[in-house]
Image: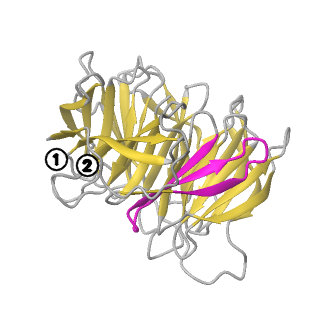
Amino acid sequence: MIIGLYSCGQQTAEKSQTSEPHTAPIEFWLGTYTSSPEQGIHLISYQPDTNEFDSLLLKGEVKNPSFVISNKAGDLVFSVQEEGGEHGGSVCSFRFDREKMQLEKLSISSTQGSGPCYITLDPSEQFVIAGNYGSGDLAVIPIHGDGTLGAAVQDIAHEGSSVNEARQQSPHVHSLVFHPNGQKLFVADLGTDKVNIYDFDPNREKPLQVSSPAFFQVEPGSGPRHLVFNKTGDKIYLIHEMTSEVGLYDYDLENNKTTHVETYDLVPKSFEGDLGAAEIKISADEKFLYASNRGDANEINGFSIEEGTGLLHKIQTISSGGKTPRNFALSPDGKFLFAANQNSNNLIAYERNPKTGIIKQLNGEFTVHKPVYFYMLK
């Protein structure tokens, strides 16, 4: 089902004095959790001049499309269907027609496991790689020339556990991030407190092979979640979900060696309440890093990045404007940050100072059912 060109939710914004917008809108795909067929994937527009959000398109009849990405050309869209149960989860592919503002479902392929929560395209865009949180494995799914998906050509199951009996009795794959050189895939596993490393070659029958060493270990009970590299690929910034921290690691590509440098708290040592760090992003100029924290904190944290060393210095902690900021994103021009609060059903816009890295919440707010993930369009 496709519902096009409509506006949902509330736009509580201060409009500018100009009658016509002068700045180009910022657009992004938004993944959500669903509870009815008419909910699903949104194409959202944000107009900086009027500080208003609008939903340009909604693709319904997709179950829990919690993670949504696009190819470089922008004409193909891929999403998970985050489900468990007997048949497990899946990945869907769609054709996006901007002129008609339509998203046509092309195919669906099993992720060979349950609870897929993250997908990535390899640099050649020949494969979608899906990470299954529930079953603790990852699947490599080929993309055909017409945008349809084939059956998985590889499924890799992780093994192990860690110290938190409530959450770490088994593997839980949580993110899949390619090194900037495109030849290695780093897979954060919350359940085992490891980041697994795979060598990638799209020309092999099974594109992923276990690297040597096969992983790097994080502090027991940390719960590695999402990670980002700097552009040169010698620094890794990793969210420790369960302890609400950011870990900094040096990476030596030649020797495939990772070394822990420092760990930074997102909350004070005196903080009492549930913890749940979630997303992490680096600004395009690599001068600032941001991390979200859920649980009872519900905050966005800002850090400056020390040139050369990559060390972090906290510059700001600010409310996410709602509950459970699972994801956030920086606009392509770096002037805005958008937060998605899953459990308060709202998007929040922040104005960002590119020179200082400081963000300021604007009055623009948008209501949407359980927003989870942003994919920014250039």
In this view, the residue in front, 336 or 201, is 336
Residue 40 is marked as 2
Q: Height in image: 235 above or below 276?
A: above
Measured in 3D between alpha carbons, the distance from the residue under mark 1 to the one under mark 2, in whole angstroms, is 7 Å
Quadrant location of the N terminus?
top left
Q: Residue at image x 36%, y 32%?
A: 128
Q: Position of residue 115 (x, y in %)?
A: 31, 55
Residue under circle 1? 61
Q: Main secondary structure of the magenta part?
A: strand
Amino acid type at circle 2 is Gly
Q: Is residue 343 above or below residue 194?
A: below
The type of residue carrying mark 1 is: Glu
Residue at the spot 72% in from the left edge and 34% down from the top edge: 285
Q: Nearer the viewer, residue 200 or 142?
A: 142
Report x, y in % for residue 94. Answer: 25, 31
Q: Secondary structure at mark 1?
A: loop
Residue 269, horizontal then vertical, whole percent? 72, 78
What's drawn in magenta, residue-wise?
335-363
Numbered disc 2: secondary structure:
loop
Q: Is residue 120 left or right of residue 66?
A: right
